[in-house]
């Protein structure tokens, strides 16, 4: 069975210490040969400038194919498209197009009076430029704003109809969660290979658990028990690596060809899982040749 294609998500640094961590993360993971790497926006577009700087630097210094996150939040259509144009001029050819989270303290997304109303409008406008490969978000579990369990799949189909090339899912903790979602997408007419599972290696269970509950991802009770026992034995990293590897193996065994890792700018578990599922570094490949 061939090794899966991979990609990574990073977030832009907000301090000198965070900068060092980002660059160390990129240096450690770049040799794995990702198909692309993405750089996030903060909630409410708060890291817009930092994102642009990180995207252009990673592309220039490491030669990676970088996808910039772009959202609709707190910006006019003209401002958003100007940011996209600046990416195109810098040689960036991929965008992760998202509606975006509302600014901190605001419960729901409210479009800018002169901005895009939602992600579909943003995707349509970006697709019309012809400048980018467009990746979008997908929710294998019901989005908090979804009307029913099928609404997320129908909305994802609209994103593809608007011009999206592939979708990256929110993270999940059990392979079956993604596989059920993929089946629902196929039933709606979405090609299975266009839906990429988002994988989050668990560096810190308590932190990831809070994040999961905030984003609507379900938390299996067995994970709480497993990490409680692992913490007592000092084996959290060993457990996290084993669980993530097992889930990735299951996904690849079910025909998944591409895994997208949310690194949280902490590369060690991601690297170890990639190696465990058969992804070799460029150096190893060169030595074999």
Image (cartoon, rainbow, N blue to C red):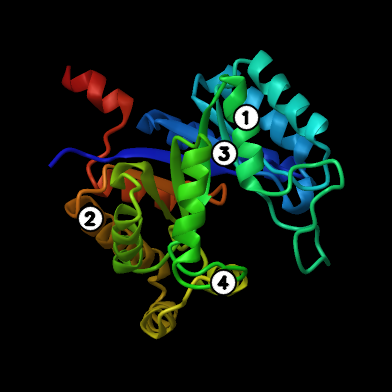
Can you say whether 166 is above or below 85 in the image?
Answer: below
Q: Is residue 154 above or below residue 4?
A: below
Helix, strand or loop status at disc 2: helix
Residue 98 visible in the picture: no
Which numbered marker is on residue 249? 2
Left or right side of 277 for 159: right
Secondary structure at badge 3 equals strand
Query: Label 1's element?
Result: helix
The CA distance from mark 1 to mark 3 is 11 Å
**Is label 4 in contact with label 1 (beta carbons under 8 Å)?**
no
Which residue, given by chain and number where applicable, does mark 4 sit on?
147
* Residue linked to disc 3: 96
Q: Quadrant of residue 123?
A: top right
Q: Which corner quadrant holds the C terminus?
A: top left
Q: CA distance from mark 4 to mark 1?
A: 27 Å
Q: Give the CA separation, mark 4 to mark 3.
A: 24 Å
Residue at numbered disc 1: 126
What is the distance, in whole Å, between disc 1 and disc 2 at their CAs?
35 Å
- Percent coordinates x, y for residue 61 in the rendering: 58, 19
Please report contact status of discs 1 and 2: CB closer than 8 Å, yes or no.
no
Nearer the observer, disc 1 or disc 2? Answer: 1
Disc nearer the start of the sequence (3/2): 3
Q: Depth check: 286 or 154 in front?
A: 154
| Spot occupied by residue 206 in the image (x, y as percentages of width and height) | 55, 74
Closer to the chain start, of discs 1 and 3, is: 3
Between circles 3 and 2, the one closer to the viewer is 3
Answer few, some or many: residues within 10 Å of disc 2's Cα (few below 14, many 20 plus, some between 14 and 19).
some
| Dot 4 alpha-carbon crowd within 10 angstroms: few under 14, some 14 to 19, many 20 or more | few
Gap in angstroms between the C-alphas marked 4 and 2 = 33 Å
């Amino acid at each position: 069975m061939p090794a899966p294609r991979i990609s990574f998500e990073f977030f832009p640094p907000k301090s000198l210490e965070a900068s060092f961590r980002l660059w160390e993360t990129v240096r450690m993971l770049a040799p794995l040969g990702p198909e692309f790497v993405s750089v996030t926006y903060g909630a409410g577009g708060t890291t817009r400038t930092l994102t642009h700087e990180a995207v252009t630097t990673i592309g220039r210094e490491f030669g990676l194919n970088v996808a910039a996150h772009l959202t609709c939040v707190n910006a006019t259509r003209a401002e958003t498209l100007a940011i996209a144009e600046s990416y195109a001029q810098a040689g960036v050819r991929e965008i992760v197009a998202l509606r975006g989270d509302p600014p901190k303290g605001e419960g729901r997304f409210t479009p800018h009076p002169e901005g895009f109303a939602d992600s579909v409008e943003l995707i349509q406008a970006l697709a019309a430029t012809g400048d980018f490969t467009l990746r979008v978000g997908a929710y294998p579990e019901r989005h908090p704003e979804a009307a029913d369990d099928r609404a997320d799949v129908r909305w994802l189909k609209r994103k593809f109809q608007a011009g999206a090339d592939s979708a990256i899912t929110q993270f999940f903790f059990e392979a079956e969660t993604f596989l059920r979602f993929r089946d629902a997408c196929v039933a709606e007419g979405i090609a299975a290979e266009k839906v990429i599972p988002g994988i989050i290696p668990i560096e810190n269970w308590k932190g990831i658990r809070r994040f999961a509950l905030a984003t609507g991802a379900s938390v299996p009770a067995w994970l709480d028990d497993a990490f409680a026992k692992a913490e007592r034995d000092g084996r959290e990293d060993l457990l996290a690596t084993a669980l993530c590897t097992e889930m990735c193996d299951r996904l690849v065994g079910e025909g998944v060809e591409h895994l997208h890792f949310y690194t949280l700018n902490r590369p060690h578990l991601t690297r170890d899982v990639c190696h465990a599922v058969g992804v070799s570094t460029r150096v190893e490949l060169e030595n074999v040749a």
